[in-house]
Amino acid sequence: MSIFGSRSPGLPYSLKQAGFPLGIILLLVVGCITDYSIILLIKGGHLSGADSYQSLVNRTFGFTGYVVLSVLQFVYPFIAMVSYNIIAGDTLTKVFQRIPGVGPNSLLANRKFVILAFTIFLTLPLSLLRNVAKLGKVSLLSVVFAVLILTIVIVRLVTFGPSVPSTQDAWAFAQPNAIQAIGVVAFAFVCHHNSFLIYGSLRDPSLNNWSCITHVSTFVAVFISTLFAASAYATFTGYTQGDILENYCKTDDLATLGRFCYGMCSVLSFPIECFVTREVIMHTFFSGPLTTLSHAIVTVMVIAAVCSLSLVYDCLGIVLELNGVLSATPLIFIVPSACYLKLSQGHWYQIDKLFSCVILIAGLLIMTTGLVMTILNPQGCSHGKEMAYCMSSNVTVDNGTLPSSSASQSSIFTGNML
């Protein structure tokens, strides 16, 4: 659930940035690297005797490496929590507006109120839990929501996709923003920051068991993510936004169900990221486990900071890109490979070492190039705006009535093509 679920709204956007064929290839490649590097991480833990990501890097690269990783491990889940709040604010406000009597000026249509309400009454209580295993039922519920979302996206590809006007070069092999697309995919796929937490919760925490679980889980997540991204992009092509649910019409009741599922996925995924940020703070600033009071204070401070940022910023695409290149890419590509290369014995031309070298170099290139491109070529954001193809009098998805795909309708939108 750390891979597919609340982070997946940006995956169709990565196909738009990279080009559809190249984007699919990047999804599969990053998925394979994710699988390989998660196993490398636990191998490194076995070689060094470490039981956490931070202790692994500390024993491998000393205090400097420990500080760098601590920053990465804090920044990634922290920004992820900001993105979850943005998704919840975007999606749930539209859900509430489908309730009779709730209009655009209603309190339930105000994204700031919705974010605050869900933070206080749901994410904060769940984040205050001390044992990550207690979130098991929450994770199962998130899986159910994810399956519903995928089903809705596929249904709307068939029923609504033909009515969305075509866009120029929608199926080109590659686009100029491919490096930034890798950052978005990396953001969706990274789960390294909580790998040791999950590994430690296994009944049989052995390397063979972990490898088997990782292969199966990653394969399923990559397959579902690729199917989701391809179906959503094929529906909207050049109109695809950083949050794919912004592309569906507000009057689409099936999409409204999808928005509800995504919003709840985001809310329910929030606590696991809070667990990670709190653990980083505990290891960095406290000599041992947090007391009950310290646990509560740290949790409230982290969530207050996340909530403040998500209230003032609402553009998801740039959040995904920056978190991808600044923290997700090092966590997937660079750190696990560097640790394994330094800890493992034997010749440099061993297969694991060669793969680790390639992944490390690729990660450095993606991180530096992606950051430069994100700064020089920031993507636009049309948060909260109804898409042009939804505003035509010919387009309505209320009660299952879907638009036609006539040539005359396509000509209406020629001026609105991206």
Image (cartoon, rainbow, N blue to C red):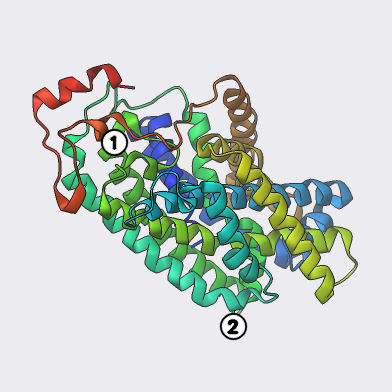
- Which residue is painted at 60% across and 64% down in the image? 123
164 vs 34, left or right, is left
On the image, numbered disc 1 is attached to which residue? 236
**Disc 1 and disc 2 in contact, CB within 8 angstroms:** no
Location of residue 133 in the rendering, given as x and y in whole percent from the top left corner: 60, 77
Q: Is residue 328 visible?
A: no
What kind of element bears circle 2?
Answer: loop
What kind of element bears circle 1?
Answer: helix
Residue toward you, 182 or 58: 182
On the image, numbered disc 2 is attached to which residue? 203
Marks 1 and 2, how far apart at CA = 44 Å
In the displayed structure, would residue 318 be above or below residue 61? above
Specify few, some or many for label 2: CA neighbours under 10 Å numbering under 14, 14-19, or 20 or more: few
314 vs 301, left or right, is left
- Which residue is painted at 64% across and 70% down in the image? 125
Location of residue 375 in the rendering, given as x and y in whole percent from the top left corner: 61, 24
Q: Amino acid under label 1?
A: Phe
The image quadrant where one finds the C terminus is top left
Residue toward you, 324 or 355: 324
Whichever of callouts 1 and 2 sits on the residue coming sooner in the sequence is 2
Question: Residue lying farthest bottom?
Answer: 203
Q: Nearer the viewer, mark 1 or mark 2?
A: 1
Q: Amino acid under label 2?
A: Arg
In the displayed structure, would residue 374 be above or below residue 135? above
Q: Tag on residue 361?
A: none
Residue toward you, 206 or 147: 147
- Which residue is painted at 26% across and 39% down in the image? 235
- Which residue is painted at 68% across and 47% down in the image? 308
